[in-house]
Amino acid sequence: MNRRTVALAVLAALLIALPAFAGNYALSVATLILYFAYTGQAWNVMMGFAGQLSLGHAIYVGLGAYTAGGLFFHFGIGPWAGVWAAMLVCVAMGLVIGFLAFRFGISGVYFALLTIAFAEFTRIGFDHFAWSGGPGGMFLRVAQRDTWDLANFRGPPLMYYYAMLALTALAFVACFFLLRSKAGYYWQAIRENEEAAQALGINTFRWKMLAVAISSAMTAVSGVFFAFYYNNLFPEQIFHISRSIEIILGPIIGGIGTLFGPVLGAAILTLLSDSITDTLGALGWEIPGIKQVFYGIVLLAVVMFLPNGIWPPIARRLRL
Amino acid sequence: MPALDLVANVVVSGLLTGLVYGLMALGLSVIFGVVRVVNFAHGEMMTIAMYAATVLFAAFKLDPFLAMLPVAAVFFVFGYALQAGFINPFITRPEHSQFMLLVAVAIILTNGLLMIFGPDARNVQVDYQLESFELGPVLVDKARLYAALAALVAAAALFAFFRFTLTGKAIRACADNYLGAKVVGLNVKHLYSLTFGLGAACLAIAGCALVVLVDVTPPLGPAYTLLAFVIVIVGGLGSMGGALLGGVLIGVSEALAGLFIVPSAKSMFSFGLLILVLLFRPQGLLGRRT
């Protein structure tokens, strides 16, 4: 076994055992970290692997959440069926955006702005969409929270933690194999130099579409989790551009295009935000906005001094 | 069907507001056209100018249209410093890295404002805000007209600077060919910083003009950033005339959408327009194909 496998096994064991010593609050923080790690991993497929900068990933979280949430709310259809519908809707949306953008040769900054436009368009659309509750939001019934009801994905915080841990692990393994598959090598070729990739005979349109499809399907599952974990959905919150930014901060801070970057980035950012809150609370500096100012300063420092993210230098140091 | 004179009123007011939006977007467009960096902190920076105008008004009773000059001067220096200190090292980095940098700046600016001024809306009250000129059936708000005129004057000055001065010509050379500009001995980094300073000064003037028309709160920043994106893409990223045209188009179309459809759906219209323009004329209405 190499060092990498051992390190991963230790980490996995720690995460599985975590609920044994963590209280409910620590568990909710850990769940949040895993949520961002998973969603960041999904975004990383599109940007980190295939080089397509999406700044509107909240659209897939939102559509996934509203599809599964809506099916449950209106027809009592549980999340296990809902998640497929959610993935279908998100992949369809991703393919529409991808088809339009890639067919018309939109790339780089223009592609990024197009993804923002679609997300904002959808956000305002949902504000006027009565089926989903409009701006007033959609509320899922909160049933008993102490027993595991896997069929309806209802249960104590522990269940959500393990669900998110399983998803994150699954995404990690899937990305590991994706990166080493034919598609993975094609994506990296496209990311590094699209024209050269095309000259080598790669059908860049098709492979970029595949990246969008996989990324949007994975993000749809985040949305379903979000719907059944928080039980309330508001267009203003779920589709907002700040949600999209939140999703991509983890992978960028952690290390874009790496497998462990999104996980590390999510952990650092969530813990950072939490510890800033605690420190400021202890100091008695409870001015609105001060927390985000510190957060912004840390982001600024990381992006200035560690342009490839935090993970690559750590990986070198640990020889992983 | 609303009466015709009501429609005319809405169109005129949308057109005048649109010119101010256009000046705001002009700053973004000039910065992108030359430095090739999308300023994701654009609206946040303009919100600072709006707050500056309210503070100067509260402290010295300084009319926002006079406050424009000192605020623009400070913003020029601020923009120059931001580009020279933070963005210049990023011009060769990938887009997502530049994006992160400016998002971090935007987070600091918005929440810095929240820390200093709190979440409550602020405004400026001048006596001509409630007055209007009567042109036949059309009532033109005085404040709105002044704001639009200020935007036009500032845009014309910027246009003249780029067209007729040697420095302006040098900046255009940087925009056309980065390497060529370096080869002939232009100080590209200085010119980039100058450009960012000018873009920021545009914002300052647009912000001071806008604060006469709307109340200002910290979350306004991200909303204006998005609005500026829509305008410059519709008009043509990097095109100066396009930014003004885009501003007017968005101003009028949002005003009309507010009249004919639900007011809250009006920006859906703008984003829809943005998507259409990106797909069928990605260089924008007045942009050049690269």
Image (cartoon, grey):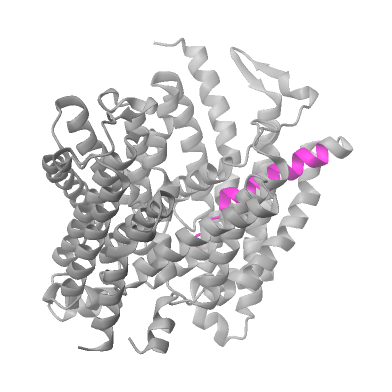
Q: Position of residue A44 (x, y in %)?
A: 30, 65
Quadrant for residue A105, please give it. Answer: bottom left
- The quadrant of the picture occupied by the N terminus of chain A is bottom left
The tally of labels here is: 0
Q: Residue at x 19, y 32 (%)?
A: A72
Quadrant for residue B95, please give it. Answer: bottom left
Q: Residue at x 58, y 39 (%)?
A: B19
Does B161 lie within the magenta span? no
Residue bounds of the magenta highlight = B37-57
The reply, left or right, for residue B282 in relation to residue B207 is left
Q: Residue at x 35, y 67 (%)?
A: A262
Q: Position of residue A316 (x, y in %)?
A: 39, 88
List the single residue furthest toward the front.
A20
- The quadrant of the picture occupied by the C terminus of chain A is bottom left
Q: Is residue A200 above or below residue B284?
A: below
Does B49 lie within the magenta span? yes
> Predominant secondary structure in magenta?
helix
Q: Nearer the viewer, residue A174 or B250?
A: A174
Q: Is residue B232 above or below residue B223?
A: below
The reply, left or right, for residue B85 in relation to residue B128 is left
Q: Position of residue B1 (x, y in %)?
A: 39, 10
**Res. B11 in view:** yes
Q: Nearer the viewer, residue B133 or B2?
A: B2
Q: Nearer the viewer, residue A21 or A68?
A: A21
**Res. A52 in view:** no
